[in-house]
């Protein structure tokens, strides 16, 4: 018996049967794909509706009525929590701007810098005028914690306001409902 598959060994009936099976499987695959796309769309819509209710409707209702936390009859607790997101734009100019701002506002330890020396300058490396390029990186979670502290949201006095934040730093806060089930 040969390891290779030869079409001459397959009858017309076998080919027709195989093609019918493939067609059936392709039809099933397309139906499953359609179900998956519908489920993804339903999930997206449900997520949007949940986020709107959790981040806008309920926090606004609580704030308008002076509430932060409410214990329900079933023992669960519903409360408003403030969430913070922080990111730094990826382009070099914005990243450098944020690094400069952090250094000027006592956050220099958050900036990780590398000196990159071009290979063409290797001979000059030992001389005083080495040419280098600075590459900076910052951990956004550490920057977020630093900013919350500087904004006075971690118990210390505020030393900056949100208006003081540099271009290229995306910092925003939003209220969201939290349900604690007991």
Image: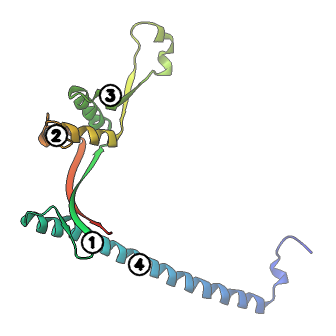
Circles 3 and 4, Cβ within 8 Å, touching? The answer is no
Question: Which one is earlier in the sequence, the residue at label 2 or at label 4?
Answer: 4
Q: Which residue bears the numbered disc 2?
A: 152
Question: Which one is earlier in the sequence, the residue at label 3 or at label 4?
Answer: 4
Q: Quadrant of residue 102?
A: top left
Secondary structure, mark 3, is helix
Q: Which residue bears the numbered disc 3?
A: 109
Q: Quadrant of residue 43?
A: bottom left
Q: In this view, does 3 lie to the left or right of 59?
A: right
Q: How far apart are marks 1 and 2 (CA)?
A: 33 Å
Question: Which one is earlier in the sequence, the residue at label 3 or at label 2?
Answer: 3
Q: Where is residue 164 in the image (x, y as percent from the top left)?
A: 14, 37
Disc number at residue 150? none
Secondary structure, mark 2, is loop
Which of the image's four quarters has the N terminus? Answer: bottom right
Which of the image's four quarters has the C terminus? Answer: bottom left
Q: Where is residue 119 in the image (x, y as percent from the top left)?
A: 50, 21
Circles 3 and 1, Cβ within 8 Å, touching? The answer is no
Q: Which residue bears the numbered disc 1?
A: 75
Question: Which one is earlier in the sequence, the residue at label 4 or at label 1?
Answer: 4
Q: Can residue 90 be seen in this view?
A: no
Q: How far apart are marks 4 and 1 (CA)?
A: 33 Å
């Amino acid at each position: 018996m040969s390891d290779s598959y030869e079409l001459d060994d397959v009858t017309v009936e076998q080919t027709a049967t195989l093609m019918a099976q493939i067609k059936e499987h392709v039809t099933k695959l397309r139906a499953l794909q359609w179900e998956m796309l519908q489920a993804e769309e339903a999930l997206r819509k449900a997520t949007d509706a949940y986020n709107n209710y959790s981040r806008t409707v309920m926090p606004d209702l609580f704030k308008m009525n002076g509430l932060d936390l409410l214990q329900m009859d079933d023992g669960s607790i519903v409360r408003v929590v403030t969430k913070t997101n922080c990111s730094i734009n990826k382009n070099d100019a914005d990243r450098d701007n944020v690094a400069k701002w952090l250094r000027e506002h006592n956050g220099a330890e958050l900036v990780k810098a590398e000196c990159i020396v071009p290979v063409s300058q290797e001979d000059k490396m030992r001389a005083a005028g080495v040419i280098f390029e600075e590459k900076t990186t910052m951990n956004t979670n550490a920057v977020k914690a630093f900013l919350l502290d500087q904004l006075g949201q971690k118990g210390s006095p505020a030393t900056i306001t949100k208006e003081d934040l540099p271009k290229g730093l995306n910092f925003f806060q939003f209220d969201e409902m939290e349900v604690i089930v007991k």
